[in-house]
Image (spheres, rainbow, N blue to C red):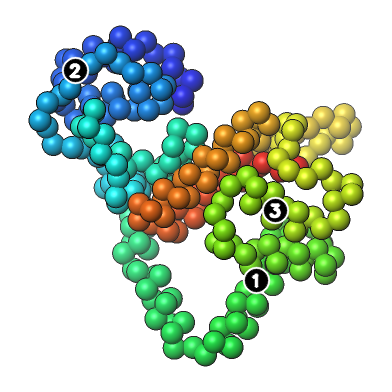
C-alpha cells in the first residue's frame, strides 16, 4: 500500500484537498497520504471544522480513543502504524460477539470457581492447546518439547512484545540451540511443500522479506500497544496480531 501511494504525485492529492478543503473525505485523504508517504504537502489549515475519524467505526474496528491531528482536523483512530496496520471489517457476526460482553461473563464465572480448580482447568487447556498447535503442523513433539512450548505460552501477556521478547520465547521453545540459528530469520521463507520430482518449492504462502522483519515486528508490537491503550475490541486485536505474526513468519 505504501509503495502504491508513493507513486501518486503529491500535487494530485493537494489539488483534491484544495477543491474541498473542509470536506471530510478530502481531509482523510490528506492525512492518509502524509501518514503513508511521510511527505508533507504544502496545504493551508482547513480552519475551524469538526474533527472526523480516519476510520468509520461503524464499518471497521478502530481505536475508541484516537489522537487528534490538528493539521488535518481528523481523529487518528487507526489501530496501527504505517509499519503494520491490519484492519478488520465490523461484520454483523463480529458486532454480535462484541456486544455479548464475553469478557465480563468470563470474569463473573471465574469469580465463582475455587482458585485450585481454575489452575487445573488452565493447565488442562494449556496442554491441549500445545497438542493442537503441533497437530496443525503435522508434528509429534517429544514430551520435553511440548512442555517447553507450554512454558512459553503460559507467559503470554507477562511482558511487552518486541523483537527481544519474541527471541527469548523462541529460545525457550527450541531448548537445545546447538544446531539451530536463533533469532529472526536472515533468509526467505515460505509455507508449503516441495515437488516430489524436482524438489522445487510449491508455496501456499510466501513469508515477508528478511530485511523487513525488524520493522514489521516493531509495527506488530506498536499495534498491540495502541490497541490496548485505545480500547480496541480485545478479541479482534488478538486475532489481528495472531494472523499478522503468521503472515510475517519471522522465524525459520
Give me the C-alpha separation between circle 1 and circle 2.
56 Å
**Which numbered disc, 2 or 3, marks the residue that appears first in the sequence?**
2
Q: Is residue 3 above or below residue 179?
A: above
Give residue 184's position: percent from left, percent from top: 70, 40
Could you say whether the residue bearing mark 1 is in a helix, strand or loop?
helix
**Which numbered disc, 1 or 2, marks the residue that appears first in the sequence?**
2
- Tell us which disc is closer to us: 1 or 2: 2
Q: Are marks 2 and 3 in contact (CB under 8 Å)?
A: no
Location of residue 95 by image quarter:
bottom left
Residue sitting nearer the eye, 68 or 204: 68
What residue did someone put label 1 on? 126
Q: Is residue 35 above or below residue 114?
A: above
Q: Residue at x 62, y 64 (%)?
A: 155
Location of residue 118 by image quarter:
bottom right
Give residue 82's position: percent from left, percent from top: 45, 32
Q: Residue at x 51, y 39 (%)?
A: 219
Q: Residues within 10 Å of mark 1 (few under 14, many from 20)?
A: some
Residue sitting nearer the eye, 247 or 37: 37
What residue did someone put label 3 on? 168
Location of residue 191 by image quarter:
top right
Question: Which labelled disc corresponds to residue 103?
Answer: none
Q: Is residue 22 above or below residue 221?
A: above
Give residue 245's position: percent from left, percent from top: 59, 46
Residue sitting nearer the eye, 240 or 77: 77
What residue did someone put label 2 on? 44
**Which numbered disc, 1 or 3, marks the residue that appears first in the sequence?**
1
Q: Are marks 1 and 2 in contact (CB under 8 Å)?
A: no
Could you say whether the residue bearing mark 2 is in a helix, strand or loop?
loop
Amino acid at each position: 500500500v505504501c509503495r502504491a501511494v508513493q507513486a501518486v504525485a503529491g500535487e494530485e492529492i493537494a489539488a483534491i484537498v484544495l477543491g474541498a478543503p473542509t470536506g471530510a473525505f478530502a481531509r482523510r485523504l490528506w492525512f492518509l497520504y502524509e501518514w503513508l508517504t511521510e511527505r508533507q504537502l504544502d496545504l493551508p489549515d482547513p480552519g475551524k471544522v469538526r474533527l472526523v475519524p480516519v476510520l468509520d467505526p461503524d464499518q471497521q474496528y478502530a481505536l475508541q480513543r484516537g489522537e487528534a491531528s490538528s493539521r488535518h482536523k481528523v481523529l487518528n483512530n487507526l489501530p496501527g502504524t504505517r509499519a503494520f496496520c491490519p484492519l478488520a471489517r465490523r461484520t454483523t457476526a463480529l458486532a454480535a460477539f462484541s456486544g455479548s460482553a464475553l469478557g465480563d461473563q468470563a470474569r463473573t464465572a471465574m469469580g465463582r470457581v475455587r482458585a485450585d480448580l481454575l489452575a487445573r482447568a488452565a493447565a488442562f487447556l494449556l496442554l491441549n492447546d500445545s497438542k493442537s498447535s503441533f497437530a496443525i503442523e503435522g508434528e509429534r513433539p517429544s514430551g520435553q518439547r511440548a512442555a517447553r512450548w507450554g512454558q512459553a505460552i503460559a507467559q503470554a501477556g507477562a511482558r511487552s512484545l518486541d523483537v527481544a521478547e519474541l527471541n527469548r520465547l523462541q529460545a525457550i521453545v527450541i531448548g537445545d540451540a546447538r544446531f539451530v540459528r536463533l533469532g529472526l530469520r536472515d533468509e526467505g521463507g515460505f509455507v508449503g511443500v516441495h515437488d516430489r520430482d524436482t524438489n522445487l518449492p510449491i508455496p501456499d504462502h510466501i513469508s515477508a522479506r528478511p530485511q523487513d522483519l525488524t520493522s514489521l515486528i516493531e509495527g506488530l508490537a506498536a499495534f498491540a500497544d495502541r490497541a490496548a491503550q485505545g480500547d480496541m475490541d480485545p478479541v479482534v486485536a488478538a486475532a489481528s496480531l495472531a494472523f499478522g505474526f503468521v503472515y510475517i513468519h519471522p522465524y525459520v
